[in-house]
Image: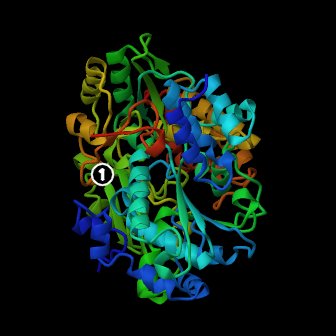
Amino acid sequence: MTWSPATSERADAIVARYPERRSAVMPLLYLAMREDGRLTDEGMKEVGDRTGITAAQVLAAASFYTMYKREVGRHLVSVCRSISCHLLGSQAVLDAVADETGVPDGETALDGSLSVESVECIGACGGAPAIQVDYEMVEGMTPDSARALVRWLLDESPEVIRSDDLQGRFGGSPSFDPGPVDPVGAIGPFPAFGPYGTAAT
Amino acid sequence: MTEQILTTRMDAHPSDSHTLARYEQTGGYAALRKALGMKPEAIAEEVKASNIAGRGGAGFPTGVKWGFLAPSTPRYLVINADESEPGTFKDRQLLERDPHQLVEGIIISSFALGVNHAFVYVRGEYPRPARRIQAALEEARDAGYLGDDILGSGFSLDVTVHLGAGAYICGEETALLNSLEGRRGEPRIKPPFPAVEGLYAQPTIVNNVETISNIPWIITNGGAAYDAIGPEGSRGTRLFSVSGHVERPGNYEIVMGMTWRNLIHDLGGGIRGGKELKCWIPGGASAPWLVPDNLDEPITVQACARLGTMLGSGGIVVMDETTNVVAAALSLVRFFAHESCGKCTPCREGATWLERILERILHGEGRHSDLDLLLDVSDNISPGLRWPPAMTTICPLGPSAVSPITSIMTHFRHEVAAMVSGEVPAGV
């Protein structure tokens, strides 16, 4: 199965941004995740064909990075556990998320609705403890607000995840004044950036 | 006197500091016009004269680094926005709140270095900062500050934003370059240094976001003006990320030379809940810790070196009197064990064993011999346990895992021993 014309067009535009096409491996892996909802063997073969390397070379690269996931739910809930979040109670936040969803750290719900993971520093130390949903940040969490967050995710199954929306609904004090609202949001468990996949209101 | 360079615009105009309109209205892109009228070598001279040192962690003088750039072409400039050092969130604010400051710095630096294609490597967990810098690049292109024949100068520049995918090691510049080439993010053996053989084996300069965000100010005001800010050896302002058990966490731009007491107790608002300070990490997870005896020391490169630590990435993590230092050290060591790329044995195996030993101590299964074992494993990663650390590895990640160990064994050995003996309850 090859990529749709629209995805192919995005892929060509990504490759064109680099002096050498192999540099497009990482962005194309995100595009592959957007296409299939997760990273598949077919997706990696497609990335290899478009960058002039073998599927094994693509796997070698992809397997090095934590954000390329072979198995992941519709939404990805990442709870930071590094030092500043640790000091301010990230373990209790993670426990609350696992308890409320029934999905332990590193696992995916049986119905594929979401995955839960603990992650290393996400750069939200001033707003610790912090969570990302599909890599959109929400800071100043408590166990209770984390429960409400994942309950909302499961009940509403929102199409688009936006950081400002999460922060307004569930967050506490952020690392810094975030400035104006960013209308762009994530449409899957991969970063909402340019050609990989975003949604704006 | 507090002098701000990097954060004036975002403080004064919080609603639109990221836009081209506000940037131009507050003097933006005037430095670029000035730079395009200068000789590239003269720009590099100003940067060298400023004595600005890299703000990513290693603290290498930027002008000196630029001087190593080999003459062959094409050459590349890569902005390191892979900010991942625990305790550090300053580059995120610079990218989100004043992206044009960085874009102007990139254009000026590229002109000075003879670069026609630059990259911004943003960590994958920073999609919003990546969106902001991408939007700023597009605004700049539409305004004629990027692309072909910039402002009629004949100079052309293209900038590509590249997203990482969750690997701290890619903040190490040679690992970053491998990653940017579509490979596993494993560090390269140096030499050759990137300035000689970098991206696609071509001459490449890798600079941090904060470093390059200072370039417009340096060109506008001159290198000598920058060199007049702060004490010798620690010139300029720095954006410090303050987090942990403080009342007012956040990013604070300060002139170096201020004391730790000022930063933690005045700017940071002191310790949460009226508790006492126990210790703090002065420069990101890789830095050995300081203790209250050091509160009146100045925040300078030299004073930190004298105390056996560093300002590193500018991430300051404050811990109060209730902190379980074994649990805190485990959080830090686990980070390095998780982020080790696996290429060098002392780092891959050593960090993992340090994590296991701390875990069993924390879970009440520690042995008395574990105290010396922690130091022995550490000594095999970084022989002599001195500062700056001796290296048995290609990059500094392995030795960084040793810092939390030497910190707790120097300052809080009695607490570790008490946990092993069962005198204090194990657990977090």
Q: Quadrant of the C terminus of chain B?
A: top left
> Identity of the amino acid at label 1?
Val
What residue is at 21 percent from the left and 34 percent from the top?
A169
Q: Which residue is mark 1?
A: B246
Describe residue B330's horizontal placement relative to residue B279 as left or right: right
**Residue B85, image x and y in percent?**
51, 50
* Above or below: residue B124 compared with residue B229: above
Q: Is residue A139 visible?
A: no
Scheme by which the image is coloured: rainbow
Up the image or down, A183 lies above or below A113; here it is below
Q: At x 56% / y 77%, what residue is drawn?
A: B155
Residue B189: horizontal and vertical position, in percent? 77, 55
User: Looking at the image, which residue sits at the far front?
Assistant: A5
* Number of numbered callouts drawn: 1
Q: Which residue corresponds to the image point at 48% horizontal and 18% vertical from the top-left?
A: A107
Residue B238 appearing in the image? yes
Q: Chain letter of disc 1?
A: B
Q: Position of residue A113 (x, y in %)?
A: 39, 17
Rendered location of residue B239, percent (x, y): 40, 65
Locate the N terminus of chain B by quadrant: bottom left
On screen, residue B416 above or below B319 = above
SS label for mark 1: loop
Query: How busy is the neighbourhood of tag 1: few (under 14 within 10 Å), some, or many (20 plus)?
Result: many
Q: Nearer the viewer, residue B369 or B22?
A: B22
- Quarter of the image holding residue B77? bottom right
Residue furthest top as drawn: A110
